[in-house]
Amino acid sequence: MTALVVEALTVAFGRFTALDAVSLAVDPGEVRAVIGPNGAGKTTLLDVISGITKPVSGRVMLGDRIDLTKRSEAEIAKAGVRRKFQKPSVFPALTVRENLEIGCGPALPARERPARIASVLGEIGLGPRAAVPAGRLAHGEKQWLEIGMVLAAEPALLLLDEPVAGLSDAETAQTAALIRSLRRPDRAILVIEHDMGFVEAIADRVTVLHEGRTLYEGSMAGARHDARVIEVFLGR
Ligand code: ADP
C-alpha cells in the first residue's frame, strides 16, 4: 500500500513542459520533501495533486483507488488531501480555537469538535494560546496554527508549501520538531522547501526536481553526495 503514487506526470503550459514524466511514490507515514531550484516544477506538482492544474498525461493516485487527476479541487479535498499554502491565511480577528473550528469543516458533528480541536491544539503546541486572536500570534505561531487548521480536517495527505519561509532560526527548528511529531501511519506529508537544513531534519526521503524532471530520489544524505544534484545546486 502506498499513500501517494505519481505516475509519469506531464504538465504543459502552452508549448512549455513544466513537468516531464515525473514519477514518485510516498509511503504511508512518510515525510517527503520535494526540492530543486526555482522553476523546477515543485509548485506545479503540488498544483496537480491538489487539482488546481490538470496534466497532459500521467496520473496521481491517492492510496490504491482514487485517481486525483480525474477529480475537482473540492473532491480532492474531500478525499483527504489538504494543502497549506505559503502565505498565512488565518483569520486574524478569530481566536486560535475559532480558527481550528473552521479547519474542522462543516461536516464534522458538533459533539466531535471539542475532542478534535483539543487533539490538534496538542499537536501544534498552541494549547496555552487557544483563546488568543490569531492576529496577535508571532509569525511562527501563525504558521503552526495554519498547519493545525489543515490537520483539523484529518488529512490522509498533507501538502506544505515552504512552511519555514520567513521564519527565524529558532522558529524553523521548532517547526522541524513539530513536523517530525506529526508522523502517523495514516498520514503522509509532502513538503516543498528551500531550507536544506530543515529538509534534512524532517524528510525521510527527498525528491529532487530539475527542469521538470526527477533528478534524484532517496535520502538527503545521499542527495548531498549525488554528482547531478551537486551540479544543479552549485550551478545556480
Ligand atoms: P518551482 O515551484 O519549482 O519554482 P513552478 O512549478 O512554479 O516551479 O514552475 C515550473 C515552471 O513552469 C516555471 O518555469 C514557471 O515559469 C512555469 N509555470 C508555472 N506555472 C505556469 C503557468 N500558469 N503558465 C505558464 N508557465 C507556468
Image: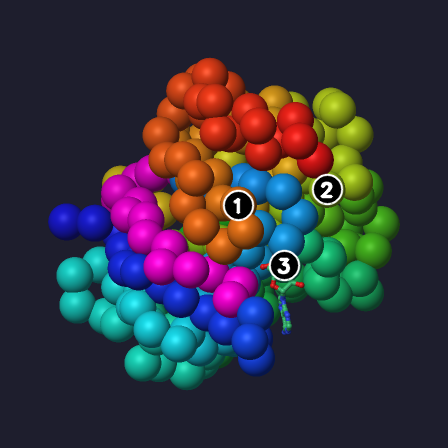
Q: Is residue 68 left or right of residue 126?
A: left
Residue most toward the right? Answer: 136
Mark 3 or 2, nearer chain start:
3
Q: Secondary structure at mark 3?
A: loop
**Gap in angstroms between the C-alphas marked 3 and 1:** 22 Å
* The label number, if any, that marks residue 104 in the structure image: none
Q: Is residue 154 left or right of residue 139?
A: left
Amino acid at pointer 1: His
Amino acid at pointer 3: Phe
Looking at the rendering, in which quadrant would you find the C terminus?
top right
Name the residue carrying label 3.
85
Q: Residues within 10 Å of mark 3 (few under 14, many from 20)?
A: some
Quadrant location of ligand 1?
bottom right
Whole-percent x and y of residue 156? 34, 56
Q: Residues within 10 Å of mark 1 (few under 14, many from 20)?
A: many
Whole-percent x and y of residue 61? 26, 64
Q: Secondary structure at mark 1?
A: strand
Residue at the spot 26% in from the left edge and 43% down from the top edge: 27
Residue at the spot 79% in from the left edge and 40% down from the top edge: 166
Q: Nearer the viewer, residue 53 or 157?
A: 53
The main secondary structure of the magenta stretch is: strand
Name the residue carrying label 1.
210
Q: Nearer the viewer, mark 2 or mark 1?
A: 1
Looking at the picture, does residue 17 appear above or below residue 142?
below
**Gap in angstroms between the C-alphas marked 3 and 2:** 11 Å
Question: Which segment did they paint magenta?
Answer: 17-31
Mark 3 or 1, nearer chain start:
3
